[in-house]
Image (tube, rainbow, N blue to C red):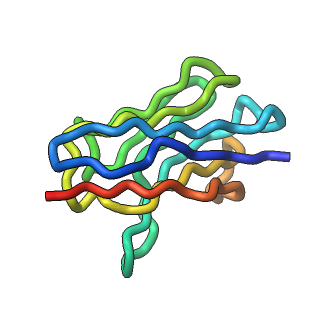
């Protein structure tokens, strides 16, 4: 069964940094694409970043140059390093997984809260 567990959220001042972790279950295929999404109160969920099994990455324009998604290998957590945080980055952050070649993320973690104070 594919399961994802996020951790690392918290409260940080504007300009600070946080690192989120997404730990996939052992049954999660190494070829799956792992994405990070976020949802702020009253807003739609939005894409943040993604990484493939071969470690190709993709970012939303709003986080390019500030956030970095990484993984050491297919059996280690996926990290989202967030630097130069802004109050508008405050949201619940989710990691999700989808098979390569598909469009829909079918597996989701429970989310972790990130709050950036001004």
Residue 118 placement: quadrant: bottom left
Residue beneath the point at 57% across and 46% down: 6
**Where residue 21 sits: x, y (%)?**
52, 37
Residue 89 placement: quadrant: bottom left
Residue beneath the point at 54% across and 43% down: 7
Residue found farthest to the front: 11
**Where residue 90 sits: x, y (%)?**
31, 60
Residue beneath the point at 54% across and 25% down: 71
Residue beneath the point at 38% across and 54% down: 114
Q: State how many labels appear.
A: 0
Is 111 positioned to the left or the right of 97 in the image?
left
**Where residue 46 sits: x, y (%)?**
42, 63
Residue found farthest to the bottom: 42
Of residues 11 and 92, the one drawn nearer to the viewer in this rendering? 11
Is 4 positioned to the left or the right of 50 in the image?
right
Please tell me whether residue 91 is drawn above or below residue 72 in the rendered image.
Answer: below
**Where residue 52 sits: x, y (%)?**
57, 33
């Amino acid at each position: 069964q594919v399961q994802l567990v996020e951790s690392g959220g918290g409260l940080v001042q504007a300009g600070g940094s946080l690192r989120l972790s997404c730990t996939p279950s052992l049954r999660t295929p190494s070829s799956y694409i792992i994405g990070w999404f976020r949802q702020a109160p009253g807003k739609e969920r939005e894409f943040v970043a993604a990484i493939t099994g071969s470690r190709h990455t993709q970012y939303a324009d709003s986080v390019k140059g500030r956030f970095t998604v990484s993984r050491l290998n297919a059996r280690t957590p996926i990290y989202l390093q967030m630097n130069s945080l802004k109050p508008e980055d405050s949201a619940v952050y989710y990691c999700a997984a989808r098979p390569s070649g598909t469009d829909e993320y079918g597996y989701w973690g429970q989310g972790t809260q990130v709050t950036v104070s001004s």
